[in-house]
Amino acid sequence: MPQSEQFTSSVDSVDTVLSRMRVLAAALPERDGIAVFNRVYLTVTEEVDRHIDAGRFAGARAAITLDVRFAERYLAAVDAVADERRPPACWRPLFQFRRHPGVRPLQFALAGINAHIGHDLALAVVDACRTLHCEPADLEDEFDRVGDLLVSLEERIREDLMPGPDLLQIADPLTHLLGSWSLERARDATWSAARALWALRRLPDLAAEFAERLDTAVGFAGRMLLTPLPD
């Protein structure tokens, strides 16, 4: 059975998502790689929540459903590690390297975004379609608007977490490493993956294989993003 059918909802509102992420933010050490990503994701989710409250999503119910289905996959990965279970392959590099002294905060942030956008979002679109009894095309506006918010925040994330002039000795390899990954390209690939998974929903074995290969490929990219750099 594909992951999208196996998944069980653990949160039921954007407020619950925000509450859980704030608890994590308070509990985790600041330099922990999961804490770095959690801060970024909390900022994004707060922004999405403000847009929903301001009526900027034409389909508020669809936006909320997609946002919650999306967030709970990250939270499920956190819960899996806390329970000493294996998280999805896309998340394993971040959990494995979360305390590595040679990995920079920006690497942690983008590795988490890579896992969440590259894998979780595709499955979340399918989850949301099942919940709302709709097609992926019915969620495209919400998908694009959330993606636009992420892209607008990415530049700020890079500016905030990029090393300053006193760390120029690592700036070149870091710039080269992170320049190989693009959020916009990842978002485009995710939409295609979501549509493919939805089209395969009546072929569960093939859908499961597709989802597993997606998980593995995104995990490989995450491992590259977390390459330790010299001091």
Image: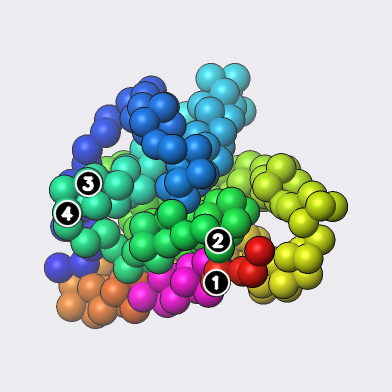
Q: Which residues are magenta?
A: 216-226
| Camera sees residue 208 | yes
The x and y percentages for residue 187 are 57, 61
Q: Residue at x 55, y 69 (%)?
A: 228
- Between the residue at mark 4 and the residue at mark 2, the CA separation in whole angstroms equals 23 Å
- Between the residue at mark 3 and the residue at mark 1, the CA separation in whole angstroms equals 24 Å
Amino acid bearing label 3 = Ala
Q: Is residue 63 above or below residue 203?
A: above
Residue placed under numbered mark 3 in the picture? 82
Amino acid bearing label 2 = Val
Q: Residue at x 26, y 79 (%)?
A: 209
Q: Is residue 75 left or right of residue 164?
A: left
Q: Residue at x 73, y 65 (%)?
A: 170
Badge 4 or badge 1: first in the primary sequence: 4
Q: Residue at x 22, y 41 (%)?
A: 9
Badge 3 or badge 1: first in the primary sequence: 3
Q: Helix, strand, or loop for circle 4? A: loop
Amino acid bearing label 1 = Thr
Q: Helix, strand, or loop for circle 3? A: helix
Q: Relative to the observer, which residue lies in front, 155 or 7?
A: 155
Residue placed under numbered mark 2 in the picture? 103
Amino acid bearing label 4 = Glu
